[in-house]
Amino acid sequence: MKSMKLNLITKLMLLILTPMIAFSEEAVDFNTDFLEADSTENVDFSKFSHANYIPPGNYSLAISVNRIKISMEQPISFFNPYYDDKLSLACITPELYEQLGLQKNWSDKVTWLLDGECLDIRSIPEMTIQGDLAKNNVDIQIPQAFMEYQDPNWDPPARWDDGILGAFIDYNATGRVVHRQVGDKGTESGITATGTMGANFGAWRLRADWQAQKGELNKGSQSWAWNQLYAYRAIRSLNSRLTLGEQYLSSTLFDSIRYLGASLETNESMLPPRLQGYAPEIAGVAKTNATVIVRQDGRIVYQTEVSPGPFRIQDVNSFGGGTLDVSVQEQDGSTTNYKVETSRLGTLTRPGQLIYQFVVGKPSKNEHDTQGPAFSLGSLSWGATNNTTIYGGILGSSEYQNIAIGLGRDFAPFGVLSGNLSISRAEMGRVDNNQTLSGNSYNLTYSKQFDDINSQITFAGYRFSEKNYMNMNQFIDRRYNENTVDSGKELYTIIFGTAFPDYNANMYLNYSHQTYWNRASSDQYNLTISNYFDLGKIKNLSLSLTAYKTKSDQNDDDGVYLNLNIPLDDNNTSISYSGSYARNTNSHNVNYYSRLDERSTYSISAGTWDKDKATTSGMYNYDGDKTQLNINGTYTQDNQSALSMQLKGGLTMTPEGGALHRNTSINGGSRILLDTNGVEGVPIQTGVTPVKTNRYGKAVITSVMDYNRNNLRIDLKNVPDNAEAIQSTQSATLTEGAIGYRKFNVIKGEKILGTVSLANNSFPPFGASVKNEKNIEVGIISDNGFVYLAGINPSDVLEVNWGDKSTCHIQLPEKIDSSMEKIILLPCK
């Protein structure tokens, strides 16, 4: 009875009645002999003769609009409209009306009932509302012609939530200790941490990205830096984001630059999914348990721990195109550095739609100083036809100008082709004898899905730049810092994937080749072939082979990586073999992995490294309610031993309360504060690992998707024995960076069966509501005063009410027998 809803008896009663009228609109007479006479005196059964009739009152129901669920269960009031007292309608309040997704012009057309409290559905032609207690749902049907754009996984702006007032700090900290037996012998340690502090005021988000490091492994330096200070908000009516402060230019036309200023640009996350664009990908191979750090202009934009073998990073945040510096720090002490040169694929725009970006600012450095002249930027992408997009832009200052124009076209069924031309002009001043340097850059990109052969070219690009072409970053670095900058010539990029269904195999290729006017070229490729197969009674074995190469001024590394994974015990345990064959070193490793429970995993491994040196390692992961913990340890014979620990989490505080929490999303991202009415230990489902509320009944969920519906559920199977979840589901669609707040109706206390009697020895009528001192319903009277009460405590005073004003009060005894074996007499005075 742990998850039993308190209005179960009422619903069972109505479920008995509903099928009797579901197949006919004609009136139906009921035989009420199965109820006691006293109980039937206060119940008007004539109203149940109308199809889908629900008695006036409050119910916890979900809401669907045109078969798309827009909210989980919430209190919905049913009432009898003045024009037909035999009709029962759900009350659509002004707040709920805003969530329906009607076109804006309907706000001036609709009329209201009950002094403006409930929508008069007659004012919207062909609109219907139907309550269904069997499905706990209110189904609203509105003609599609009256609605905004609809998508099953996307809500229109009317349903977005800006969240509540609050502040937070997110962190991702890694500490390492290394003991070396060769070279600079001895023990060194270091700590590196990144994160975001933030505060929300209405629709405004204030953010401060920070970075800290300390220790010998960080070259003995101790530092704290505020990488980026900025504020932003969503502009719903424009599908755009307004940002003020320090930021990085993100453009499909111009390379990224850090600047201090303001920007107003279309936020594609606010558009329906099919209109959203391209994101970059970083691929590589780790030889040991390693830390991958991605930097842009010296700033850490992404950091994660990876296991030995190939890795693919697809969730780098706030990337604007250009050059990324990737560092793979192995636990054997070695480091691989390489650059990822990328272009952005020109996104096709819906016919007639404009995607825009306007920027004013001044170039800035990491120390928050500005450098160079102020500039402005404007760019537009226009859907000229069903398959053609024209886009272009201008970036200009008193010393530097760049004009770009491009065309994208869908040559169905041959793929999407996009090309653009950029022309730069730079006044170099005394650095280059007051020369004015001009140059062109040509960019061509292609994307295609080959359904017949199960293949896809996700991104293919070619870029050629003349010798004197410069982006603004290169101009600033060359003129104001007098640095020699890499002058790119040609860039080839391709990301290709294909499947072989008959063989359960896949192939993936990520390749880039960059040439320069003033230095040697660089290459980077990663080719992976994988296969899934069965071997006797062992199912879903996987075999993968990866070949990789990284060549630049800093590194020249290539090799082959082989991995065989054998799952055991329903995929919670596995044994794997991995072999790495590199130019200078070979390694072999056998690994055992197991999931201890829904929160913890571990792995241990042993093998050889550098031909004959033994190596062992171990890893432990724990997804706690307050933080995420990752511990790695490695020992290599006659070389070194290393131990690292990573903590990832945050603290979020609001006027409604707060909590320490793990962080499964980007730093500074959206989150939801969940409130279980002060009840501790209530599990909230969030994928594999639930989050339990703290001692104050609060929990924070960070695995939130902006502008998408996030469904939240209490794990009813594991609710504490003394708790009752009256409301177990909620939903939220948040704007970017919001702190959402959702409260579940959970009560804590004993459960009893009782009989409620009045002073004249009669009983309250069937359906009377029993509420506690917090006005939370804890039971509903059945026939002969029988009631099931939950969430009650000794000496509580309960109120029973029915009709318009009839009430009485129950004083619970000081001791309660909660065995449910006896029916307790409960006088109501």
Image (cartoon, rainbow, N blue to C red):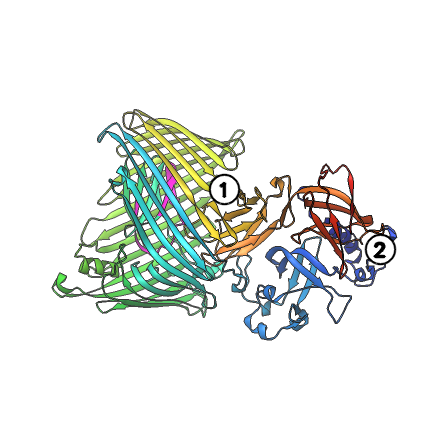
Q: Is residue 309 a member of the stretch shown in magenta?
A: yes
Badge 2 amino acid: Thr
Q: Residue at x 49, y 51 (%)?
A: 704
What residue did someone put label 1 on? 625
- The image shows a total of numbered marks equal to 2
Which of the labelled discs sits on residue 394, or is there none? none
| Residue at the image point whose x is 65% and y is 52% from the top | 774
The residue at 14%/61% (across/down) is 431
Measured from the top left, where is residue 561 in percent x and y? 35, 35
The crowd level at tag 2 (other Cα within 10 Å; few <14, some 14-19, many 20+) is: some
Q: CA distance from mark 1 to mark 2?
A: 51 Å
Disc 2 is placed on an element classified as helix
- The answer to whether residue 609 is above or below residue 353 is above
Type of residue at label 1? Answer: Asp
Instruction: From the viewer's perspective, tell me whether residue 682 is left or right of residue 39.
Output: left
Look at the image and give the residue range highlighted in magenta: 302-326
Q: Which residue is mark 2?
A: 40
Q: Is residue 428 visible?
A: yes
Q: Secondary structure at mark 1?
A: loop
